[in-house]
Amino acid sequence: MKKSLIALAVAGALTAPMVAQADATLYGSMRVLVVDQDGSDLDVADGVSRIGIKGDVDLGIDGVKGIYNFETRLRADTGEFAGSDSYSIKDDDGDAIDDANVSAAANARLANIGITGDFGTALAGKMYAPHWLWTSAVTDATWNDAVIGTVRESVLRPSNTLAYISPNMSGFQAAIALVADAATGTDDVDVTNVAVKYAANGLHVGLSYVDDASTASQDQLGLAASYTMDAFKFSARYQEEENTNAAGASAGNDLETAQVGVMYTMGATTLQARFTNIDIDNGADADQWAVGVQQMLGSQGRVFLEYADAETGYAGVTANDRLSVGYRLDF
Amino acid sequence: MKSKLRGLLVAGTVSMMLAQPVVADEVNVDPWEGFNRAMFSFNDGLDTYALKPVSQGYKAVMPDMAEKGVSNFFENLADVGTMINNLLQGKFENAGQDLARISFNSTFGLAGLIDVASPMGIEKHEEDFGQTFATWGADSGPYLVLPFFGPATVRDGLGMIPDTLVDPVHHVDDNGARNALYVTRVIDQRAQLLESEKLISGDKYTFIRDAYLQKRAFDIADGDGENYDESNF
């Protein structure tokens, strides 16, 4: 149930009667997990809960609307609005990746405004990268425990971003996102992401290329597809990363990720399984198995169990022998 | 006028045919009745003097809620065997629901003491190897009363062996704990029958046999009346 902020609007109208209140939507998702992970104590953990406001405003131009979206993480286990944007993302040496792609800015997930119309959508601010939406999310977004769901994302919700997403042309869409942060790197444009997707008749295909020149140079190519057939949904994703150091030579830690997943839905019950293989040039490879069962309780509540087992100690695969039992409410 | 008469005649014949008891080729489902009756009296004696009093005491002492919890606990364990048998019978959707039931009842349902899956809308199934063999085409064989284990058929009796192997209680390492679980389960199951056994009237042996065979046929067909075949219990 999207809750209209009528009360707020009324309160606002009393103090600032000249400000027209657009129809803002307060939304969120509260997710709490009980996690039993190998080598750790039992943990009542936050499953990346979030709360946000979104909406659109009339710009007075025919067929064009202004849109805005703000979303922040809210920790369901402690209540604090804290922690980094993304879950701990490590490079192959186990160090946290610290560049424009993974903002350390506290807990802000999304903050963007834009315009949308027949011509497509233009957005500015902090937003989901097309790379995530059209390739990574294909195999990740169905998992409730983000640690199990995400193996490695370096382009997730970039800050300082300008993006254009084309309208849907018989199933085809194209997008470009540019990250320009004066504080990062020496180039005007630090990260470029171009992507295309096709989605129709149960088939989704996404292709995305990322050129990241922020600190060292990184190229990423992602390809993902999913197909829904009756109660089954099959998904697959392949991603290639090439890393070069400041001198322009290969950093020797190129990385390939391959994932296949299957999902089966019967009424309110969903079963899913996924296999991930990570092949890294100069480090240990990793295999991860994940299985999950989810039960929807009405349209906005759900409970789930997810289990992941990783074969190696590759730092990017944090979900090693991890069982999560979770409860989630969306509003 | 004539056709009307003929119609009446036909109707009369039909109704007379319907009134006749249908004597099909009766399959004797109980050729071993002598042996079975002997085993039945043994079991009945054992029940009357040992199991039933204990179960009555259990029911009297245990609060209803705790009793329900114990039943749920064993039902959750039974879902494991049900899931395996649903897989073996090719009922993958049912097996998926069983997996969901076990997952949620074992966690949110506090190790199975509370059946949270049923109110959540995940259907409960009851399957065992006897039913699986039947699905694969095995005939029931004669009715058979096993000492201690009670009514069965040859097929269902054989099915009890793999049933035991997939029973989680069977895999409890600690002897004491395992035996305690076995005993508790037997008492729990007996206590659940205390109410319904009041319905038994007439020859107890025949009553239980017919009820058992009818129930098995129903379970094998998963309640699907069209596949109900009374010649093959």
Image (cartoon, coloured by chain):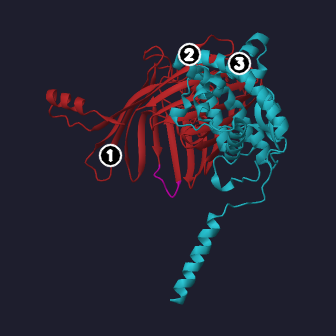
Q: Assign a secondary structure to mark 2.
A: helix
Q: Is residue B42 visible?
A: yes
The mark total stands at: 3
Q: Amino acid at mark 3?
A: Tyr
Name the one closer to the observer, A88 or A253: A88
Residue denoted by label 2: B60
Residue denoted by label 1: A65
Which stretch appears magenta?
A166-171
Q: Which mark is residue B195?
A: none
Lower sequence index among marks 3 and 2: 3
Please state the horizontal and vertical placement of residue B201, each as a whole percent of the image: 63, 37
Please state the horizontal and vertical placement of residue A175, each as a whole percent of the image: 51, 45
Name the one closer to the observer, B126 or A255: B126
The CA span between labels 1 and 3 is 82 Å
Please state the horizontal and vertical placement of residue B42, each as a whole percent of the image: 79, 26
Q: Amino acid at mark 2?
A: Ala
Q: Which mark is residue B49?
A: 3
